[in-house]
Image: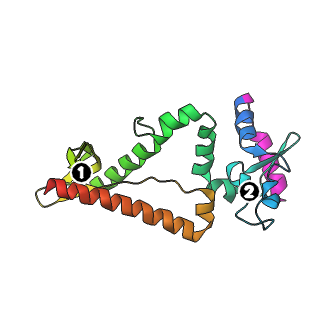
Amino acid sequence: MIMRILIRYFGSILKNEVEIRILDSLSMRFGDNSAFLAESEFKGSIMNGHSIFEKPFIKDGDKYYCFTPMIHHRNLFLIAEKLMMRDGAYYQKKFQQNTSPISRDVYVEKKVKSVMKSFLSDVTFYSSVHYKIVEDEVEKNPELDILGVSDKAIYIIEVKAHELSYKDRVRLDGAKYKFKESVAEACKQCSRSVDFYQ
């Protein structure tokens, strides 16, 4: 019943070649996720193939199937990232690096700065603050993601937008390790900034 409704729904919204190409790029055929049953020592383990999270639709002939809308809703960012990764140069330049105003890192930093401004309206916030230090007899020019200045306090904020691999996402210890690693790196950078400003 649900399957038929979704198939009809897709059929009714596909209006042109661009929409069909988009849905095709998000679809796989039966058997494309064979790694799910072939990889690792345990067949059918959740740690095996995960194509369904990147391509949540199944194409069979000219029909498209979706087993549950939750798959693409919960994996929207992963799907978008995988689509961009198909063009490696674009992904590296526009998504991963801080050089582009639409990169993931810049977006997250802007969002954090916006939220902090809404909480602390009397604080002036600056983005991408560079300062010069010497570490191990080497001159460095580190960057502080966000610096907030007010009469009462100085806010030193490091933003991390590390990604989790599929295995990190399904293994709790992997996610915990990545989180711990990100927090430790941010703390180190903040501590270095505090030392400089003191």
Residue at the far left in the pictured view: 151
Magenta stretch bounds = 1-17
Q: Depth check: 57 or 1 in front?
A: 57
Which corner quadrant holds the C terminus? Answer: bottom left
On the image, the x and y values in percent for residue 96 come to 48, 42
Give the mark toward the camera: 2 or 1: 2
From the viewer's perspective, is residue 151 above or below residue 19? Answer: below
Q: Do the residues labelled 2 and 1 touch (CB within 8 Å)?
A: no
- The answer to whether one can see residue 45 in this image is yes
On the image, the x and y values in percent for residue 105 come to 42, 46
Q: Is residue 168 magenta?
A: no
Residue at the far top in the pictured view: 17
- Please report the residue visible at 82 percent of the width from the left and 60 percent of the height from the top: 37
Q: Does the magenta stretch include residue 10?
A: yes
Disc 1: CA contacts within 10 A as few (<14), some (14-19) or many (>=20): some
- The answer to whether one can see residue 119 in this image is no
Does residue 70 appear left or right of residue 190 in this picture?
right
On the image, the x and y values in percent for residue 158 come to 33, 55
On the image, the x and y values in percent for residue 20 come to 75, 35
Residue at the far front in the pictured view: 137
The residue that mark 2 highlights is 49
The residue that mark 1 highlights is 147
